[in-house]
Amino acid sequence: MAIRLPIDVATRVSPELSEFIEALSRIIEAVIDDACVPHERTLGAVRRAMAGGLTASLVGLGTIDPDQDDILLGEIDNLIQRYGATVAAENFVRFE
């Protein structure tokens, strides 16, 4: 079940918010693509990976802005609170 956003994000948000959404998508994609994450590609797995150093690794690679680290962790927490830790993370990846 894919969650569809009610608006066209690309045309209705500020460039800063669009960049933030893209950063969160990169983190989720990194977890989905990680062979070390055993079959669990949920928001809870993304949260654990972020807390375990994934975000810091992506900052080091230049994939994520270092100023977004805490904000992104808070946003994952908000998504988990709203949708649950067991929902598939791929539902929240921004596709272009």
Image: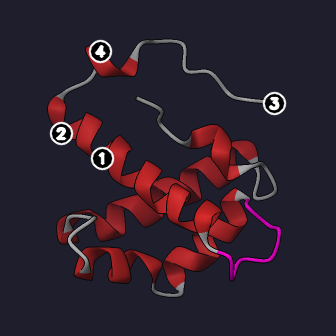
* Label 3 – label 2 distance at C-alpha: 28 Å
Q: Is the magenta region chiefly helix, strand or loop?
A: loop
* Mark 4 crowd level (few <14, some 14–19, many ≥20, 10 Å Cα): few
**Mark 3 / mark 1, whichever is N-terminal:** 3
* Label 2 – label 1 distance at C-alpha: 6 Å
Please, what is the three-letter code of the amino acid marked with disc 4?
A: Arg
Position of the C terminus, as image quadrant, is top left
Please, what is the three-letter code of the amino acid marked with disc 2?
A: Glu
* Label 3 – label 1 distance at C-alpha: 24 Å
Identify the magenta region: 35-41
The residue closer to the viewer here, 20 or 61, is: 61
**Mark 4 / mark 3, whichever is N-terminal:** 3
Q: Mark 2 and mark 1 in contact? Answer it, CB < 8 Å.
A: yes
Tell me the number on the disc at residue 32. Answer: none
Please, what is the three-letter code of the amino acid marked with disc 3?
A: Met
Q: Mark 4 and mark 1 in contact? Answer it, CB < 8 Å.
A: no
The residue at 80%/67% (across/down) is 40
Tag 3 residue: 1
The residue at 72%/43% (across/down) is 83
